[in-house]
Structure formats: C-alpha cells, structure tokens
Image (cartoon, rainbow, N blue to C red):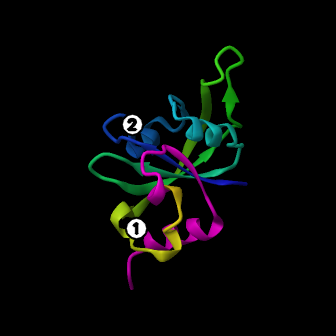
C-alpha cells in the first residue's frame, strides 16, 4: 500500500463534495510528474486530500477503490476512483507543514504546484500527528 497526497481547489471539488458523492473519479492531471505518480496508484492506497487556493491545507483522507486506469488512446488521460475515509477535525495548513523539519524535503514543500505526490510513512505519520489537537 502506498501513501499519496492529491490536491484540488475546494471551489472546484471539495472534500465535502466527495463526502456527499461517496465516490468520484480523480482525473484531469496534466503535469508530467504528477501523471507519473497518478499512474502508480493502486487499489487500497491511502490518500491525503489537500485543499489548494486560499485554504492551503490537508483536510482529510481518502482511499483508492481501484488501480489507476490509463487510456490506451490518450496516455495523459489517467483516472483513479477514490472514496472518502474521513474529514479531519483539525486541518493541517501548509504554513504548519513548512515549519516541520521532518517535512522539509517533501514535494509539497519543494514543488508546491505538483497536484499528486507520494508520502513516506514518516511524512504521513507527521501530518496525521499535526491534525490532532494539542493536549
């Protein structure tokens, strides 16, 4: 099982929209590196949902319900079916992520325009920890 982060403008398709729909097809990626990552997504992979735009924050978790599909006619047409797992009680803003030394080398910090990117288990765990309210 791999770990990913997918980004979307919430005015286009928010996590609330995904929860309402119950499932959706993630497509429309055009960046070559993001497409390379999207092609690698497999059924069961865990995915962080990141709102871009004004919010710039991880807001929840979703899951791939099928392997990535690549169109035989158009290799840039890559799709992944996803469903929501849960919305996080506390979002994790990009500014908070940038302050974490363990996340400094993550593509979210280094390549901020990339819409699909992998995470290590350490990165996933750190972001998840940041989503928990301080005690």
Q: Position of residue 21 (x, y in %)?
A: 47, 35
Quick check: 33 left or right of 18? right
Task: Identify the image quadrant of residue 34.
Answer: top right
Q: Earlier in the sequence, mark 2 or mark 1?
A: 2
Measured as percent of width and height from the top left, residue 25 is found at 55, 31
Residue drawn where x is 60% and y is 36% of the image: 35
Decide: few, some or many residues near mark 1? Use Cα within 10 Å; few <14, some 14-19, many ≥20. some
Q: Are marks 2 and 1 in contact (CB under 8 Å)?
A: no
Residue 78 visible: yes
Residue 134 lies, with reference to residue 123, above or below; the image says below
Of 90 and 107, the residue lying toward us? 107
| Span highlighted in magenta in the image | 108-135
How packed mark 2 is, by other alpha carbons closer than 10 Å (few <14, some 14-19, many 20 or more), is few
Q: Is residue 100 magenta?
A: no
Judged by depth in the image, the label closer to the viewer, 2 or 1, is 1
The residue located at (69%, 37%) in the rendering is 66
Q: Position of residue 131 (x, y in %)?
A: 43, 69
Foreground pick, 2 / 34: 34
Q: Is residue 93 visible?
A: no
| Residue that label 1 marks | 98
What kind of element bears circle 2? loop
Give the position of the N terminus as an image quadrant: bottom right
Q: Residue 54 got which mark?
A: none
Residue of label 2: 13
Could you say whether the residue bearing mark 1 is in a helix, strand or loop? helix
Quadrant the C terminus occupies? bottom left
CA separation in Å, label 2 and label 1: 25 Å
């Amino acid at each position: 099982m791999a770990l990913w982060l997918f980004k979307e403008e919430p005015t286009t398709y928010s996590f609330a929209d995904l929860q309402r729909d119950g499932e959706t097809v993630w497509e429309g990626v055009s960046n070559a590196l993001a497409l390379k990552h999207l092609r690698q997504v497999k059924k069961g992979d865990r995915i962080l949902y990141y709102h871009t735009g004004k919010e710039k924050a991880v807001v929840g978790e979703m899951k791939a319900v099928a392997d990535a599909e690549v169109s035989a006619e158009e290799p840039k047409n890559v799709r992944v079916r996803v469903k929501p797992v849960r919305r996080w009680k506390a979002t994790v803003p990009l500014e908070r992520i940038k302050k974490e030394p363990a996340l400094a080398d993550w593509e979210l910090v280094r390549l901020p325009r990339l819409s699909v990117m992998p995470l290590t288990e350490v990165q996933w765990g750190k972001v998840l920890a940041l989503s928990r309210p301080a005690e």
